[in-house]
Image: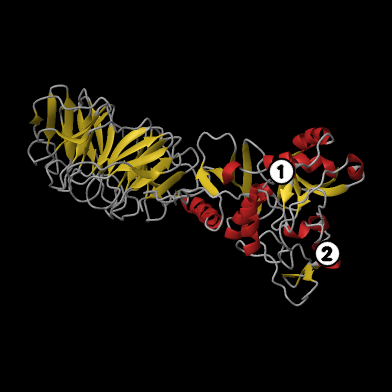
Amino acid sequence: MKKLHFWLSLIAIILFSFSVNAQQHTKTYRKVPLWELKDSIFRCTIFGKNVYLDGDIYLGDTTELNRYQNLAFALAIDDNFIAQTRWPNGIVPIEFDNSFQLSERNQIITALNEIMTPTNLIFKLHGAEPDYIFYKKMTVAELGFSGGSSPIGKRGNRQEIQLSSLASDIIKHETLHSLGLYHEQSRDDRDEFVRIIEANIDRSEPDKLHNFQKHSFFVKKIGPYDFRSIMHYQFNAFGIVVNRASLQTIERRSDPSNKNLGNNTLSTGDISALNQMYPNRPSERLMLPLFNDLFKDNENWTTGPYWGSRGNFFADVTGDGKADAIVSNSQSGITVRRSNGVSFNPNESWTNNDFVGKKGTFFADVTGDGKADVIALNINGTVVRRSNGASFTSAETWSNSFLGATKGTFFADVTGDGKADAIMVETTGVKVFRSNGSSFLAGEIWTSIGYFGSRGTFFADVTGDGKADAIVVNDGGVTVRRSTGSAFAPNETWTSNPYYGSVGTFFADVTGDGRADAIVVNAGGVTVRRSTGNAFLPNETGTSIPYLADKGIFFADVKGSGKCAAIVVNNSNIVARPAQ
């Protein structure tokens, strides 16, 4: 998008972007009479509808700017105005764009903690406060340049710091803008200390000369001129590029050979200025905690859509220890995208015709060879197509009776022999049909009373003995009936309080200890309660931001690490967050 330039009366931005430079020698200021401002103009940059001053200072959009220009003629700079640009008591609530990855949010937090440590400021995660900073993730194309932008001082309500780079110095620089600091070389006394080499400034479209304007009317100096301020331009900022190097645009008057200008961290002067602006140090100050989610950052496992009209599944059909992506469609049958540990390979057709159970389709290793087979549950019987590692073989009838149950039919290895058994849950009890590797045997009663949950019934090995246990989730908590290999033992309470998700509840091994953990997905994110083998521990954060799907969310070990990944199937692709 082309950048446009805009000459604007200086008075127009007083309300929008009053700022304080990094240092001040005196606390004096003056009101600016209207007559002084009538002919005072400066140059802005418009990118799309956004208006910027000096490259990275966000003034608002063009609609806001026109509105505030009309209001500004009644405004003068005084103590009350300056106070309005400060964050009360030095407490700054912050919030992150959900587009930021876990590691990216931690980069921002680390930079903010480095600002907090030597100053009186407090950054805290945003709660109900009306005024807060929102860190917004941008591409270079969206922002118009690589770096960041920020308003000056507190503007009120949500104000954005937009970042297309997460370099630590950029995060700090833009945050200091929002705290009230301006560019150091914009001071009205800067010509006493540095010389701007205009001939070396890039004057091509868009002209960069306007980034070196002085702002004498609405900039308040704090302390002596600070060459090493993080708010100071570097010696070759916006310079003409010659032989892939930018020419020098700023030169020290007292020591022209010294090119140390600017900084990648706060200078002593920056710290002093912030502590003058925010002089009250609270007795209790806690650093922002890093996000320690149990699931890592998003990874794209497909570059295009992969979902089925008859369902998506994740199971190890090749026998290499990694769960593969499986899709069932009414026209094309079953296709597989093998996991290579970092993504899913291209589609392979594993059946040349439709294969679906009228009462359910399942994938589980019923033969005990380490490869998940496909199971079709029908009214007139149960049919299996074995996996040979490259396709599903011809259909075999494993049961001539209907294995459907009023509270659900499941396939899991409850005997510990490596073969998934058929499990029927009825209101009167639980019946198991053992797999012998070629058929399901006659039903055995494993509980003679009903065992099902109002929030879900599950079968997974939560004890780590190789046998899937029966798990029930109710409003009051989670109970488990251990598998003995021939029956389910009496109830045990594994959580004494509710633990279920509005989006879904799952049981899979997140930690790699061989025990399935309890996983809950809500609109705000994923939480995990680890299994000790006897109970589920208190909540831990699985994902600290929402992790929702268009087509479904799953938990399976796609990397072959022994730990499950959180997998979302979207309209456009499949994304996985492996366990840490």
The relative height of residue 192 versus residue 254 in the rendered view (above or below) is above
- Disc 1, SS: helix
Residue 312 on image: x %, y %: 37, 38
On the image, numbered disc 2 is attached to which residue?
191
On the image, numbered disc 1 is attached to which residue?
82
Residue 412 on image: x %, y %: 20, 40
Q: Which residue is at 26% across, 50% downward? A: 388
Quarter occupied by residue 500: top left
Q: Residue type at mark 2?
A: Asp
Residue 578 on image: x %, y %: 38, 51
158 vs 315, left or right, is right
Tag 2–tag 1 contact (CB < 8 Å): no
Residue 548 on image: x %, y %: 44, 37
**Viewer-closest of 445 and 219:** 219
Quarter occupied by residue 214: bottom right
Q: Which residue is at 21% across, 22% downward? A: 406
Q: Which residue is at 11% across, 35% downward? A: 488
The relative height of residue 423 versus residue 99 in the rendered view (above or below) is above
Q: Residue type at mark 1?
A: Ile
